[in-house]
Image (tube, helix red, strand yellow):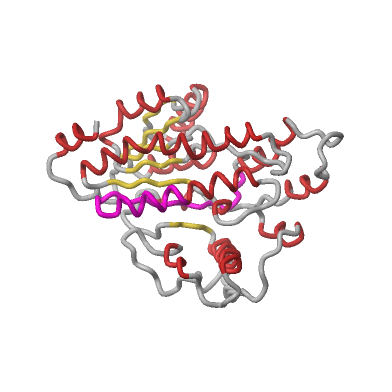
């Protein structure tokens, strides 16, 4: 397939301008995926909204008609090879940007979590993501241009009690995206992550609540009250309009995290985990470099928070703790 794509592509072309791109979004039936699909279509892009089940397509198209925007849709269960192949055969070579947004969440104490649920988490969030993106990567390499966006999470950068399975899968997504970025750097294909903080689309609530399907307080040793404490830790994070702004851009940071205060929190966590020195760890440059490899001067964060107050200084004087009192205010 790759040889055929290369033969058809001819000379490599420059990456399309920031307007009028063809953008394929997985997991577009709900939440950030649906909002981004509608917003990008309203901004004038050709949007292919790939939804997990047919009823999601019907709901999304009704919303599109209500907003007077045009969408193309496809049924896509990312774990099914037949669905992946059908979508690529319809759209693959015309796609400028692939947004790998489809994901599931699994909550509950990791020490007691049934491992088949962990395997299912990785099948959707990791293995099937790579299965899906590989043919698009080949098509983009043949054209000499393209962009692959992985919807990661702040959960890919630090860990939180009772969301361990989800954090594990998103750490794997981070490694996958960074490796692909390194491997494809000379091909003209750009790879990045967008890392939302918790958002109020229902996904985070479902993520934590999945433990109710198997957790029995009479059998399991983890106090149910401890799990419930973290159910209150959800907070607003990245908004759809920021997704709509970032996805079509030709260049931005290779890891985009919003809001800035969340970025500082995660940087502090990782710096503490690596070293108690106030100096950035050696691998820190991957944090904020843009898609062309440039590192901004304000690597350690914006100068102000959302409300205009100065950013807190980086504090690496103490190692991180995992007590609920320390983690709950972070909002994950």
Q: Is residue 159 visible?
A: yes
Name which residue lies at 30% across and 33% down. Answer: 92
Q: Is residue 309 visible?
A: no
Whether residue 193 is situated above or below residue 133 in the rendered picture: below
Whether residue 307 is situated above or below residue 224 in the rendered picture: below
Name which residue lies at 50% across and 73% down. Answer: 280
On screen, residue 148 versus residue 127, left or right, reads: left
Seen as rendered, the residue at the extreme right is 218
Q: Quadrant of residue 319?
A: bottom right
| Magenta span includes 325 | no
Q: Nearer the viewer, residue 168 or 236?
A: 168
Give the image location of residue 195, x and y in percent: 51, 52
On screen, residue 153 versus residue 140, left or right, reads: right
Q: Nearer the viewer, residue 200 or 119?
A: 119
Give the image location of residue 120, x and y in percent: 57, 32
Name which residue lies at 42% across and 62% down. Answer: 286
Give the image location of residue 203, x and y in percent: 61, 40
Q: Nearer the viewer, residue 180 or 247?
A: 180
Name which residue lies at 39% across and 43% down. Answer: 40
Whether residue 22 is situated above or below residue 171 in the rendered picture: above
Look at the image and give the residue range highlighted in magenta.
175-200
Give the image location of residue 277, x and y in percent: 57, 77
On-image quarter of the N terminus: top left
Q: Quadrant of residue 221?
A: top right
On screen, residue 135 versus residue 101, left or right, reads: left
């Amino acid at each position: 397939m790759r040889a055929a794509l290369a033969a058809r592509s001819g000379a490599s072309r420059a990456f399309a301008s920031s307007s009028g791109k063809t953008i394929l979004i997985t997991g577009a039936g709900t939440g950030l995926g649906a909002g981004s699909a509608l917003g990008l279509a309203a901004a004038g892009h050709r949007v292919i909204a790939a939804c997990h089940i047919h009823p999601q397509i019907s709901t999304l198209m009704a919303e599109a008609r209500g907003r007077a925007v045009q969408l193309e849709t496809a049924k896509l269960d990312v774990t099914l090879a037949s669905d992946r192949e059908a979508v690529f055969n319809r759209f693959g070579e015309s796609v400028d940007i692939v947004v790998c947004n489809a994901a599931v969440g699994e909550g509950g104490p990791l020490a007691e979590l049934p491992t088949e649920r962990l395997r299912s988490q990785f099948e959707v969030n990791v293995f099937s993501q790579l299965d899906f993106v590989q043919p698009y990567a080949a098509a983009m390499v043949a054209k000499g241009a393209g962009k692959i966006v992985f919807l990661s999470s702040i959960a890919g950068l630090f860990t939180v009690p009772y969301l361990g399975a989800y954090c594990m899968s998103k750490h794997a997504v981070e490694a996958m995206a960074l490796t692909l970025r390194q491997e494809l750097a000379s091909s003209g294909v750009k790879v990045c992550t967008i890392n939302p903080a918790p958002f109020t689309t229902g996904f985070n609530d479902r993520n934590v609540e999945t433990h109710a399907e198997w957790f029995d307080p009479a059998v399991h040793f983890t106090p149910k009250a401890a799990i419930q404490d973290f159910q209150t830790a959800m907070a607003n994070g990245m908004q759809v309009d920021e997704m709509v702004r970032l996805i079509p851009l030709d260049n931005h940071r290779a890891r985009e995290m919003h809001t800035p205060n969340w970025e500082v929190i995660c940087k502090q966590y990782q710096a503490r985990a690596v070293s108690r020195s106030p100096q950035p760890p050696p691998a820190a440059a991957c944090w904020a470099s843009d898609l062309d490899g440039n590192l901004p001067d304000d690597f350690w964060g914006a100068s102000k928070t959302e409300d205009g107050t100065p950013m807190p200084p980086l504090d690496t004087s103490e190692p991180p703790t995992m007590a609920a009192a320390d983690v709950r205010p972070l909002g994950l």
